Image (cartoon, rainbow, N blue to C red):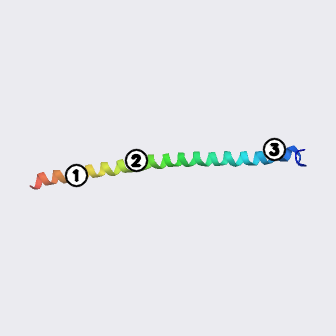
Amino acid sequence: MILGIPWWVYMFIGFIFFSGYMSFRAMRAEKKLEQRYIEQEGKVFMDRISERRNEKDEEFEQKKVISG
């Protein structure tokens, strides 16, 4: 007994803090993973927009050549 408190109480408090720390670490890792996924999906979306713009520009140039 330390200061009149059994040793297992200190262990219990230590495990509570350890659990909180591990939870915080997991939350940070999950946030990083989610951010990476969002960036990847955003890149795919921007690539599709770019492809559609290029297609429309090519169509416009073809129409311009035909009519002019």
What x and y, as percent, mark residue 17? Answer: 73, 48
Marks 1 and 3 sit apart, C-alpha to C-alpha, by 69 Å
Name the side, left or right, on which 20 lies relative to 51: right
Of residues 44 and 26, the one nearer the viewer is 26
Q: Amino acid at mark 3?
A: Met
Comparing 29 with 13, the one in front is 13
Residue type (three-letter) at the residue carrying disc 1: Asp
Quadrant of the frame with the C terminus: bottom left
- Kind of residue sitting beneath label 2: Lys
Q: Which residue is mark 2?
A: 43
Residue shown at 31% from the left, 49% from the top: 50
- 12 with respect to 26 (left or right): right
Assign a secondary structure to mark 1: helix
Q: Which mark, by number, is residue 11?
A: 3
Residue on which the image places disc 1: 57
The image shows residue 37 at horizontal and vertical percentages of 49, 47
Closer to viewer: mark 1 or mark 2: 2
